[in-house]
Image (cartoon, coloured by chain):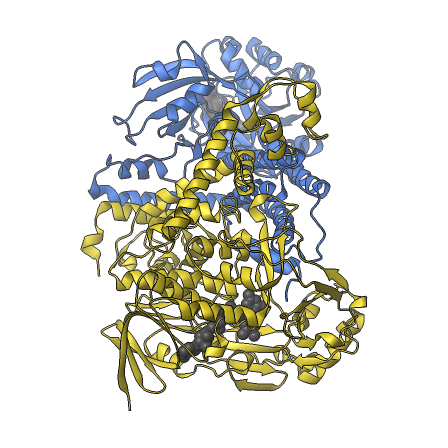
């Protein structure tokens, strides 16, 4: 049985430093190969091998991502079809870009549970497991729906719904000209059509731009907590999350894995990273100096730099200040319940303009001030959080990208003088894609719109 | 009192637009066919607008023609005016429309039926069906005659428990004061069919001699001779014009002041009316900011002074209708000849049908036309021909012919009806077709002639002509793909002004893809060494110019076909499939789709449900849970 090639992100979002975009289907290798640049073309590599390389955006011919690509030819695969897995950096932005590239390259976005469904339909999973497959499809769909609904409440869904309504009215106008040529409705002119479509395009573009900045994604502002061992970084994370997520002990170097937590601080969505990813050793500064770690820091939108009130300022602390120069930083002086040993004047000097907050996390003091400071920093700054539109997951972004592309097709068609009923094909497609985002694709809407917008009859 | 009459292969009840196509198709396929109708003087009667065609509908007429039906040929012989619509838009939405000579249309159709081999036309009212063990075996008329048949087709239109409404007056009646069909409707209910009530209406007719045309705009037919049928060679040249005028403030005020006299607003009408054919009182209430509405004055024929007042459909009281007419410029002194009215009638809920138009509960019984919830002559005729074909094939022990959504508007319409049902009179619109670009007016023959020939509806000689045309199209397309046009001054002189200069040599086909370049010019630049008739040139131009979009559509069709090929075994207990959402269970159980494709189009069934269904079917568990 042959199917279209499908693609999806197959690692949970925001979990892990590496994300995988998986393709399955007849064209999987071909699609990946068209984007991939490495030692040898993927079409010619052995099955079940993995290859280092880069993905090139065919439109701009620029390197988009650094990747590892595994090629697995059917039938010895999960779905029994050819499978390609593209491993890329774990950030939402990277993985979205990869997904976007493969979708543009001809793959279709997989439905929830579709890989498993294919595995089943291609005889990979045995009959006794069918029930489980059904449950999985149901569950995944429901979850996707829930996520969609939760994320979609409010501005974005309203925005998309209104864009769809705009498109629908445009299409209805086109349709009334077609189905009721003698009716005295204004002809949908090229100019009118262009203006209307451009408006929608601008809005979609706007959502995408914000989405791409990664700042309004569900993962939120990437906020990295740094500081020497035992200063109370994990405690800080727990305080902000209002839960004991990270293990807190008096043994320096407790935190070993990167811990990421999502938290909404007074309207600012944060993805908190407790920096054990920047592994603390005897020479903390040296570790931070490691190129990768530095990059990690650089990618952060906000740094929470924690110092110990009960300890003297060290050379490592000073280096840390240097490493975060030019970034948004909040300096937190913790353990104020203990004796003052920190040279506060020196700290003030180092902190320059950055806000300084004193806390005793043990006594739950100062957290309010910190939260206040975080929100001030962002509401006052360029990033207007209350205006932010939450584009929740990569699926939505991919769909938005698709809708923008079909809209561009429509505009191009208008421009080149294509008849309006051809243009309509792309407009309707755009409308459908936007509908998928908010889970609404009632196909009768157009006809409803037609008859409510225009007075037709005999 | 009853008596045994003759037996037939197929009996068609009704000789409206659905009935005549059904009867003719069945007879043409070699089935011995009886056509029973209330009144022989109203064969193919047009109770409303004397017009055939228009967007989507006109394409249906061509599809009927390509399948060997009659509507196209008949209107070609009997119209008073014909126009091509949407010429300024793309090829997919072009459509022909004709004004019919209403009486001539009927008599011509009746003559064709009378002359048709295997077909018996008979006046009579069917009141009951002979049904044994869920199988229909014939019909019984009011006079007690029992006719046996292997298949029965009901096409009884708006007659079913018809009730006419004018103002506060209401009485049982078929359209145009013909007798209604009451017992048959009750009988269908007894047989277990779910019936609902729909409503439609018609405007008044006025006398031509009382119209002041100087206050109206003329709407002439096309000068270029046109025809619906691919077979028509003789064209009518002397056409009659239609006329355009408008309602005005005075009209609207009069109606607004008298809304209390409207049966629509007094709650007397219970049936669901179509949104696309609202009455004038409806239009004025719903679109009260629109200062005027168009009124077309359409002659009903050459031998009559009656004029149809399109745009003034109404069920207001008769005296008010007269006053309203007189507010319209040109109609100040008009004589009304017939009053407009609304009619309510019974409709079979169409999800009770298989895509073959056979009913699910009674075998060998087919229904078509307005009885199935549609509205319009073309919609009726399109179902009519399919029901006739399938009734004959059923009688002959052959498999049903089902058009899919990529083959024609007829396929779209029937699939919509049996899959989604309808909660108002269903009218075809081009926007109902997802593959509109493929379902063009110009290529109906390419889509359906082959099928028409295969099932015995198209004679050999016509088929041969068709094949020759098709081959020539292919030959010319191939030629244009090979022949190269080189840039030169002459070449650039031929290209239209808007076109950018040709700088590099280019295949003729690619040049033709430029929106502004026509086949005419290509042919001038790279002439073929064989004669290319106009219809072939048109095909080549469209197929080449829009190949990008056409191919996109074809890919979608491929996908749909794959889904349609996955058959669902009959007798599934949807309630036993755990993962399905409750709504999906109910809907699927009601529609009982034949394929995964059809299932995916049932409203209330989402992609997850379809996936689950697919998994279930593949699993083969079906056998175990079959009812
Ligand atoms: C008032 C009115 C307004 C309309 N307005 C519109 C409109 O605005 N737009 C539009 O598109 N369409 C309109 N139509 C619909 C259009 O006329 C129909 O769709 C079309 O004629 C239906 O064709 P049909 O063959 O299904 O039924 P009909 O044309 O109604 O034919 C039914 C046939 O069945 C016969 N019959 C009925 N009962 C029996 C019986 N028991 N035994 C034997 N024969 C029987 C009748 O004699 C008749 O020949 C209107 C119709 C009416 C009456
Ligand atoms: N007295 C006092 N102790 C604190 C305060 N905040 C944290 N601590 C304690 O300091 C110790 C270290 O806290 P953590 O939050 O684990 O520190 P950390 O920076 O994450 O440490 P590592 O992960 O080991 O690098 C624990 O014993 C905490 O209870 C504070 O405000 N006052
Ligand atoms: Mg820690």
Q: How many marks?
A: 0
Quarter holding the N terminus of chain A is: top left
Residue A251 appears in view: no
Q: Is residue B500 left or right of residue B105?
A: right
Quarter holding the C terminus of chain A is: bottom right
Residue toward you, A144 or A180: A180
Determine the residue positioned at 43% across, 45% down.
B465
Residue A134 appears in view: yes
When asked about the image quadrant of residue A308, the answer is top right
Q: Colour of chain B?
A: yellow
Residue toward you, B81 or B251: B81
| Residue furthest to the bottom | B1
Spot the blue chain and give its letter.
A
Residue A23 vertical placement versus B150 (above, below): above
Q: How far across and how far down the image is residue A337, in percent? A: 56, 28
| Residue furthest to the left | B624
Residue A58 vertical placement versus A283 (above, below): below
When asked about the image quadrant of residue A334, the answer is top right
Residue B546 vertical placement versus B483 (above, below): below
Residue toward you, A61 or B526: B526
Determine the residue positioned at 39% across, 65% down.
B24
When asked about the image quadrant of residue B154, the answer is bottom left
Residue toward you, A167 or A14: A167
Q: How far across and how far down the image is residue B333, in percent? A: 78, 78
Q: How far across and how far down the image is residue A129, in percent? A: 23, 42
Determine the residue positioned at 51% across, 63% down.
B74
Determine the residue positioned at 52% across, 34% down.
B547
Residue B408 vertical placement versus A233 (above, below): below
Q: How far across and how far down the image is residue B250, in percent? A: 80, 73
């Amino acid at each position: 049985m042959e199917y279209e090639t499908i693609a999806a992100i197959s690692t949970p979002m925001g979990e892990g430093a590496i994300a995988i975009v998986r393709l399955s289907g007849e064209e999987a290798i071909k699609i990946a190969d068209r984007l991939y640049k490495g030692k040898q073309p993927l079409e010619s590599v052995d099955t079940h091998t993995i290859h280092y390389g880069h993905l090139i955006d065919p439109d701009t011919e620029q390197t988009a991502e650094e990747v590892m690509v595994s090629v697995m030819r059917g039938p010895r695969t999960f779905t029994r079809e050819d499978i390609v897995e593209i491993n890329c950096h774990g950030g939402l932005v990277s993985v979205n870009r990869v997904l976007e590239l493969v979708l543009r390259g001809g793959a279709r976005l997989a439905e929830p549970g579709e890989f498993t469904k294919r595995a089943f339909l291609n005889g990979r999973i045995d009959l006794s497991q069918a029930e489980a497959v059904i449950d999985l499809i149901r569950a995944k769909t429901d979850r996707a729906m829930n996520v969609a609904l939760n994320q979609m409440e409010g501005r974005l869904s309203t925005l998309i719904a209104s864009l769809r309504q705009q498109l629908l009215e445009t299409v209805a106008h086109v349709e009334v000209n077609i189905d009721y040529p003698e009716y005295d409705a204004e002809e949908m002119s090229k100019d009118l059509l262009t203006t209307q479509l451009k408006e929608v395009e601008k809005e979609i573009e706007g959502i995408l731009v914000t989405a791409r900045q990664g700042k309004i994604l569900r993962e939120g502002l990437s906020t990295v907590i740094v500081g020497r061992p035992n200063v109370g970084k994990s405690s800080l994370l727990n305080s902000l999350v209002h839960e004991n997520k990270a293990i807190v002990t008096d043994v320096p170097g407790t935190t070993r894995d990167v811990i990421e937590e999502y938290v909404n601080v007074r309207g600012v969505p944060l993805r908190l990273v407790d920096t054990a990813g920047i592994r603390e050793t005897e020479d903390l500064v040296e570790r931070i100096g490691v190129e990768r770690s530095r990059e990690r820091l650089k990618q952060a939108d906000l740094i929470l730099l924690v110092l110990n009130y009960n300890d003297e300022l060290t050379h490592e602390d000073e280096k840390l200040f240097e490493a975060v120069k030019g970034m948004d930083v909040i300096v937190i002086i913790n353990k104020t319940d203990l004796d003052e040993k920190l040279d506060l004047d020196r700290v003030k000097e180092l902190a320059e303009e950055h806000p300084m907050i004193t806390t005793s996390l043990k006594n739950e003091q100062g957290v309010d001030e910190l939260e206040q400071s975080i929100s001030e920093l962002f509401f006052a700054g360029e990033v207007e959080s209350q205006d932010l539109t939450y584009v929740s997951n990569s699926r939505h972004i991919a769909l938005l990208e698709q809708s923008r592309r079909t809209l561009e097709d429509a505009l191009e068609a208008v421009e080149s003088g294509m008849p309006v009923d051809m243009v309509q094909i792309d407009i309707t497609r755009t409308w459908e894609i936007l509908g998928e985002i908010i889970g609404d694709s009632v196909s009768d809407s157009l006809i409803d719109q037609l008859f409510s917008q225009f007075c037709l009859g005999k | 009192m009853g008596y045994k009459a003759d037996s037939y292969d197929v009996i068609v009840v009704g000789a409206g637009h659905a009935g005549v196509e059904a009867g003719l198709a069945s007879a043409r396929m070699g089935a011995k066919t009886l056509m029973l109708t209330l009144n022989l003087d109203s064969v193919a009667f047009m109770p409303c607008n004397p017009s055939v065609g228009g967007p989507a509908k006109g394409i249906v007429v061509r599809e009927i023609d390509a399948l060997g039906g009659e509507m196209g040929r008949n209107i070609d012989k009997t119209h008073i005016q014909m126009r091509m619509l949407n010429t300024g838009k793309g090829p997919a939405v072009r459509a022909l429309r004709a004004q019919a000579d209403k009486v001539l249309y009927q008599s011509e159709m009746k003559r064709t039926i009378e002359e048709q081999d295997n077909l018996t036309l008979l006046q009579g009212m069917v009141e009951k069906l002979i049904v044994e063990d869920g199988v229909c075996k014939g019909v019984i008329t009011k006079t007690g005659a029992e006719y046996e048949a292997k298949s029965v087709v009901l096409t009884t239109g708006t007659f079913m428990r018809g009730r006419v409404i004018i103002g506060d007056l209401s009485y049982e009646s078929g359209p145009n004061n013909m007798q209604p069909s009451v017992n048959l409707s009750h009988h269908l209910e007894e047989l277990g069919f779910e019936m609902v009530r729909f409503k439609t209406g018609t405007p008044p007719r006025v006398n031509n001699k009382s119209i002041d045309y100087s206050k109206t705009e003329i709407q002439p037919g096309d000068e270029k001779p046109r025809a619906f049928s691919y077979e028509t060679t003789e064209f009518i040249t002397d056409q009659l014009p239609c006329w355009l005028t408008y309602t005005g403030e005075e009209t609207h005020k009069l109606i607004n002041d008298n809304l209390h006299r409207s049966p629509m607003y007094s709650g007397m009408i219970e049936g669901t009316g179509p949104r696309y054919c609202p009455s004038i009182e409806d239009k004025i209430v719903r679109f009260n900011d629109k200062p005027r509405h168009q009124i077309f004055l359409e002659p009903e024929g050459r031998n009559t002074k009656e004029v149809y007042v399109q745009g003034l459909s109404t069920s207001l009281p008769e005296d008010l209708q007269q006053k309203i007419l007189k507010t319209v410029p040109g109609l100040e002194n008009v004589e009304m000849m017939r009053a407009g009215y609304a009619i309510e009638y019974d409709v079979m809920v169409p999800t009770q049908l298989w895509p073959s138009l056979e009913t699910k509960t009674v075998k060998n019984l087919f229904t078509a036309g307005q009885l199935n919830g549609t509205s319009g002559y073309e919609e009726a005729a399109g179902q009519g021909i399919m029901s006739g074909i399938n009734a004959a094939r059923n009688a002959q022990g052959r498999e049903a012919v089902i058009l899919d959504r990529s083959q024609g508007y007829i396929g779209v319409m029937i699939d919509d009806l049996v899959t989604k049902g309808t909660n108002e009179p269903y009218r075809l619109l081009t926007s109902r077709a997802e593959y509109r670009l493929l379902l063009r007016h110009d290529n109906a023959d390419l889509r359906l002639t082959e099928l028409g020939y295969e099932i015995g509806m198209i004679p050999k000689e016509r088929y041969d002509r068709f094949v020759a045309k098709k081959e020539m199209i292919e030959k010319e397309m191939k030629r244009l793909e090979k022949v190269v046009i080189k840039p030169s001054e002459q070449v650039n002189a031929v290209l239209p002004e808007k076109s950018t200069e040709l700088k590099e040599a280019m295949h003729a086909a690619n040049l033709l893809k430029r929106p502004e370049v026509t086949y005419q010019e290509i042919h001038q630049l790279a002439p073929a060494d064989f004669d290319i008739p106009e219809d072939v040139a048109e095909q080549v131009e469209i197929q080449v110019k829009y190949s990008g979009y056409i191919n996109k559509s074809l890919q979608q069709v491929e996908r749909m076909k794959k889904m349609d090929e996955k058959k669902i075994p009959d007798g599934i207990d949807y309630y036993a499939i755990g993962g399905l959402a409750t709504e999906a269970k109910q809907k699927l159980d009601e529609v009982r789709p034949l394929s995964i494709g059809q299932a995916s189009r049932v409203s209330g069934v989402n992609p997850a449900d379809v996936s689950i269904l697919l998994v279930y079917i593949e699993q083969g568990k079906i056998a175990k849970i079959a009812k």
